[in-house]
Amino acid sequence: MSLNIKKGDKVLVIAGKNKGTESTVTKTFPKTNRAIVEGVNVAKKHVKPTQDQPNGGIVEKELSIHISNLKKVN
């Protein structure tokens, strides 16, 4: 099955907790029919202190969403 949604497309979320949100696609995963959309499905991840982030803390990360929950907008 081919994806109708590509990187850079403007989409509308039609299902889930972010329903009604309009944003752009940052990455697609054709094998699993999922996409990462800017500002949608954001989760908080606890990070241990490392050399890059000496204090550690809580980082917000965008997770993928199934393409059946997205609608392409012109």
Image (cartoon, rainbow, N blue to C red):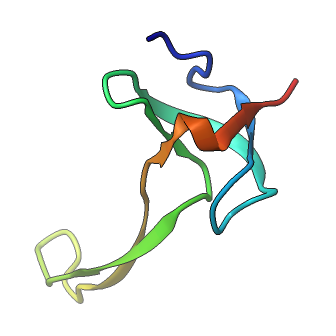
- Residue at image location 19% in from the left, 69% down from the top: 52
In the picture shown, does residue 54 fall above or below 67? below
Residue 41: horizontal and vertical position, in percent? Answer: 53, 62
- Residue at image location 73% in from the left, 45% down from the top: 23
In the picture shown, does residue 31 fall above or below 40? above
Residue sitting nearer the eye, 49 or 13? 13
In the picture shown, does residue 24 fall above or below 61? above
Q: How many marks?
A: 0
- Residue at image location 42% in from the left, 29% down from the top: 33
Q: Quadrant of residue 48?
A: bottom left
Q: Quadrant of residue 26?
A: top right
Residue 22: horizontal and vertical position, in percent? Answer: 79, 48
Residue 10: horizontal and vertical position, in percent? Answer: 75, 32
Residue 15 in the figure: left or right of residue 26: right
Q: Residue furthest top?
A: 2
Residue sitting nearer the eye, 10 or 68? 68
Residue 20: horizontal and vertical position, in percent? Answer: 81, 57
Q: Quadrant of the N terminus?
A: top left
Q: Quadrant of residue 67?
A: top right
In the picture shown, does residue 38 fall above or below 24? below
- Residue at image location 88% in from the left, 23% down from the top: 74
Residue 42 in the figure: left or right of residue 32: right
